[in-house]
């Protein structure tokens, strides 16, 4: 089979297409012939060596295709060995593409409980773009953030896969969604997905601008922070609001005013990729038509994965970047 192989950590150009042996058959595992895969920022960190993958390595967490044994059209759940506790993953948990060969390949082998029927409403690009970002965002907003109808949600960063999915999921549940962005064009596109509006985070007073857009100007019920801007996020919350953190792309540490935090009665909630139960909930929303297809920014052929990574890292797109395998 052909696969994108990483033999040295570092730059996007280290991703090269090679011919590899097909994954061996193992009891309890299935092989999926992939029609498309999708990029995530997590893949960039894998490429850079942050997850200490054993080299040579095939990255990739997201994929959709057909089961080799049955021909069924499926999407791949990238959350491996979650465990029995819904509150947090177990000690054996990992994301597909960290330490097991991932989806940047014609074939991928995964545990049998990690394949789910592909939503009939989605084409291959959208189906491949859904799992990691959809699952992560679903858990962040609903399982962890407890977002409900009539509440308000601030999403930091309007252009990435998590942010575009958060706007769609938040609007679908009846929440009022506001975004931040570096681009007015991305704010306008977020409005098309269901956002009420947005603010430019380059402005020094963007927190105050966003807060004025919340109901009564009190602040938001939930702030979704995939970048690590905890101080600004907390300032945007209403008293008793919930800050849900699922990334650190801007900064990996934060200084908080402890007294302000506890007098504000805030919740600070960490989250990551979700469980199989979360994935079932997400797929039910998609199947029902309550949530539209993931936004796909651009698609590249599999053998141009390095170019796709470079495009993702530039941060100029809106939505997911996809690799097409056929």
Image: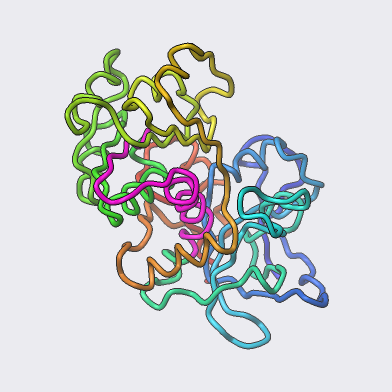
Who's the residue at 35% across and 55% down the image? 295
Q: Toward which corner of the image does residue 158 lie, by quadrant?
A: top left
Q: Toward which corner of the image does residue 233 lie, by quadrant?
A: top left
Q: Is residue 227 above or below residue 2?
A: above
276 sits left or right of 259 in the view: right
- Closest to the observer, 21 or 159: 159
Magenta segment boundaries in residue numbering: 128-156
- Closest to the observer, 295 or 15: 295
- Closest to the observer, 129 or 225: 225
Count of marks overlaid on the render: 0
**Colour setting:** rainbow
Q: Is residue 234 magenta?
A: no
Who's the residue at 68% across and 35% down the image? 10
95 sits left or right of 216 in the view: right
Query: Residue 168, how many percent across, how many down?
Result: 32, 53
- Closest to the observer, 290 or 185: 290
Query: Residue 167, how many percent across, how many down?
Result: 32, 47
Query: Residue 35, how many percent across, how many down?
Result: 53, 71
Who's the residue at 54% across and 22% down the image? 251
Who's the residue at 51% across and 13% down the image? 258
Query: Residue 126, how many percent across, how many down?
Result: 41, 64
Q: Quadrant of the N terminus?
A: bottom right
Q: Is residue 304 above or below residue 243?
A: below
Q: Toward which corner of the image does residue 186 lie, by quadrant?
A: top left
Q: Is residue 140 magenta?
A: yes
């Amino acid at each position: 089979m052909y696969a994108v192989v990483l033999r040295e950590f570092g730059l996007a150009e280290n991703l090269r297409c090679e011919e590899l042996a097909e994954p061996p058959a193992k009891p309890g595992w299935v092989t999926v012939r992939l029609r498309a895969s999708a990029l995530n920022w997590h893949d960039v960190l894998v490429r850079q060596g942050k997850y200490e993958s054993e080299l040579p390595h095939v990255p990739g967490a997201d994929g959709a295709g057909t089961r080799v044994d049955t021909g069924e059209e499926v999407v791949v759940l990238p959350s491996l060995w979650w465990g029995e506790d819904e509150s947090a993953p177990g000690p054996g948990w990992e994301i597909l593409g960290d330490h097991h060969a991932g989806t940047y390949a014609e074939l991928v082998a995964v545990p049998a409980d990690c394949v789910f029927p592909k939503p009939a409403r989605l084409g291959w690009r959208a189906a491949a773009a859904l799992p990691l970002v959809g699952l992560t965002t679903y858990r962040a907003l609903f399982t962890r953030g407890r977002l409900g109808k009539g509440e308000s949600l601030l999403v930091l960063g309007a252009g990435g896969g998590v942010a575009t999915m958060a706007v769609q999921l938040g609007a679908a549940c009846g929440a009022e969604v506001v975004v931040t962005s570096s681009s007015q064009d991305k704010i306008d596109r977020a409005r098309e997905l269901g956002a009420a509006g947005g603010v430019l985070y380059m402005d020094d007073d963007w927190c105050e601008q966003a807060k004025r857009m919340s109901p009564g100007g009190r602040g938001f019920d939930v702030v979704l922070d995939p970048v690590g801007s905890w101080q600004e996020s907390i300032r945007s919350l209403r008293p008793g609001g919930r800050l849900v953190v699922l990334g650190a792309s801007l900064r990996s540490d934060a200084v908080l005013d402890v007294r302000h935090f506890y007098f504000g009665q805030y919740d600070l909630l960490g989250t990551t990729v979700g469980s199989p139960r979360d994935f079932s909930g997400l797929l039910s929303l998609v199947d029902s038509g309550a949530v539209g297809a993931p936004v796909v920014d651009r698609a590249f052929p599999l053998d141009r994965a390095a170019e796709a990574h470079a495009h993702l890292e530039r941060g100029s797109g809106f939505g997911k970047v996809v690799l097409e395998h056929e």
